[in-house]
């Protein structure tokens, strides 16, 4: 595959994907500085990428301060009850799952 200098005009969806990827880069750096561990990234919706993080004490503190919310509750066949929390950071949706709650 040949690589050429950056095109002046990109297909619109490619430009959206690049913008979404840059949002992810900046959000992961901020998460790292705040002691969060990133588990996975979803760019299915590049205008608002989703970053999945590992559950930790910072998640609970953000819920208590009203900086994050629980948005999903359920029961898994193998792991029992769960809930998912989320907050926004730099145009990205940050999500985590708590099992056994």
Image (cartoon, grey):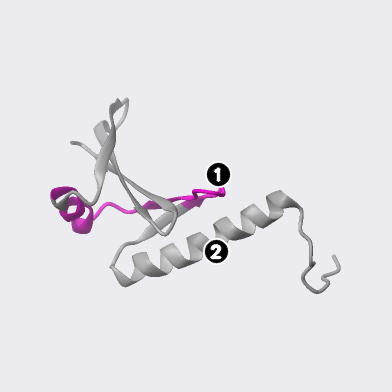
Task: Please tell me which residue is depicted at 72% across the width and 51% down the height of the picture.
Answer: 12
Q: Residue furthest left?
A: 64
Q: Position of residue 91 (x, y in %)?
A: 44, 55
Quadrant that contains the C terminus: top left
Q: Secondary structure at mark 1?
A: loop
Q: Are marks 1 and 2 in contact (CB under 8 Å)?
A: no
Quadrant that contains the N terminus: bottom right
**Magenta run includes residue 59:** yes
Q: CA distance from mark 1 to mark 2?
A: 13 Å
**Magenta run includes residue 48:** yes
Q: Secondary structure at mark 2?
A: helix
Task: Please tell me which residue is depicted at 63% across the width and 59% down the height of the picture.
Answer: 18
Return the residue nearer the eye: 73 or 66.
66
Which circle marks residue 45 in the picture? 1
Find disc 2 in the rendering and name its residue.
22
Q: Position of residue 19 (x, y in %)?
A: 59, 59
Q: Position of residue 73 (x, y in %)?
A: 27, 30
Left or right relative to 55: residue 5:
right
Q: Earlier in the sequence, mark 1 or mark 2?
A: 2
Return the residue nearer the eye: 87 or 38.
87
Q: Position of residue 58 (x, y in %)?
A: 21, 58
**Depicted 13 relative to depicted 76: above or below:** below
Left or right relative to 42: residue 65:
left
Task: Please tell me which residue is depicted at 25% across the width and 48% down the height of the picture.
Answer: 68
Which circle marks residue 33 in the picture? none
Task: Please tell me which residue is depicted at 42% across the width and 63% down the height of the picture.
Answer: 27
**Badge 2: residue crowd in 10 Å (few <14, some 14–19, many ≥20):** some
The quarter of the displayed image where residue 7 is located: bottom right
Magenta span covers which residues? Answer: 41-64
**Badge 1: residue crowd in 10 Å (few <14, some 14–19, many ≥20):** few
């Amino acid at each position: 595959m040949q690589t050429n200098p950056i095109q002046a005009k990109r297909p619109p969806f490619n430009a959206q994907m690049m913008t979404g990827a840059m949002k992810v880069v900046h959000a992961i750096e901020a998460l790292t500085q705040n002691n969060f561990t990133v588990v996975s990234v979803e760019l299915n919706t590049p205008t608002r990428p989703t970053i999945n993080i590992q559950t930790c004490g910072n998640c609970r503190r953000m819920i208590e301060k009203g900086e994050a919310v629980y948005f999903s509750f359920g029961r898994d066949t193998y792991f029992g009850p769960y809930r998912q929390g989320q907050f926004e950071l730099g145009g990205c949706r940050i999500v985590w799952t708590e099992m056994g709650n």
